[in-house]
Amino acid sequence: MPQRIGIFAGTFDPVHHGHIAFAKAAIKLCHLDKVVFLAEPNPRGKVGVTSVAQRVAMLQLAVRHDPALEVLRLPDHQFTVAKTLPKLRQRYNNAQLVMLFGSDVAATLHLWADADTLLAQTELAVGFREGVAPLLSVRATIIPTAHAHVAASHIRQGASNEVPAGVWQYIKEHGLYQV
């Protein structure tokens, strides 16, 4: 039976308990072997984002004690179906890829270039963010978590209790988010 690998691309500025809870719940509910976090260097529609090197460092701190979670850095500046998906398929050979999206991102899938290719070649798992219910016209596994209320903007405003161990210390040591 081929491996089942979750791909969780995003900004992760910073990574928080909501991201980790979603990944762990997806492993269980979607029967995944692991979840791979991909921090996008230049996320669409976002300005003033912390450097990708620092976001990757925080991700690595957040997942370091869980062998089912890993961080991957690809050379692509943004996740695109045309460029990134073939690289992931090559890297993970015969694995079944399951794309993990927050409900805010899932609600915009109809606007994506090559969305039909993404839907044909992968499965979807959607984590609902509090207050954001996507309009889905595709088959997806819905992933509820106890951390649906958490947003990276809360952490950037000083909510230290919503980040994994080690990440808050990293944020303070590197003077991120003016906290």
Image (cartoon, helix red, strand yellow):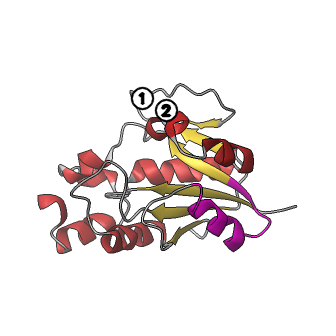
Which of pointers 2 and 1 lies earlier in the amino acid sequence? 2
Query: In the picture, which quadrant includes the C terminus?
Result: bottom left
Q: Which residue is drawn at 29% across and 51% down?
A: 46
Q: Do the residues labelled 2 and 1 touch (CB within 8 Å)?
A: yes
User: What mark, if any, has residue 132 been given in the picture?
Assistant: 1
Residue 141 location in percent, x, y? Answer: 66, 37
> Label 2 sits on what residue type?
Ala
Q: Residue at x 48, y 73 (%)?
A: 73
Name the residue carrying label 2: 107
> Is residue 65 visible in the rendered structure shown here?
no
> Is residue 141 visible in the rendered structure shown here?
yes
Query: Which residues make up the magenta segment?
Result: 81-97
Residue 151 location in percent, x, y? Answer: 33, 44
* Left or right: 13, with 88 as reference point: left
Q: Quadrant of residue 34?
A: bottom right
* Left or right: 177, with 2 as reference point: left
How many residues crowd mark 1 within 10 Å: few (<14), some (14–19), many (20+)? some
Residue 85 location in percent, x, y? Answer: 62, 60
Numbered disc in front, either 2 or 1: 2
Vertical comparison of 153 with 106: above or below: below
* Left or right: 64, with 43 as reference point: right
User: What mark, if any, has residue 37 been given in the picture?
Assistant: none
User: Alpha carbon of mark 2 to alpha carbon of mark 1: how far?
Assistant: 9 Å
* Left or right: 56, with 141 as reference point: left
Vertical comparison of 17 with 64: above or below: above
Instruction: Tell me the SS state at disc 2.
Output: loop
Query: In the picture, which quadrant includes the N terminus?
Result: bottom right
Vertical comparison of 115 with 175: above or below: above
* Residue 91 within the magenta-colored segment of the rendering: yes
> Label 1 sits on what residue type?
Val
Q: Quadrant of residue 70?
A: bottom right
Near-viewer residue (128 or 162): 128
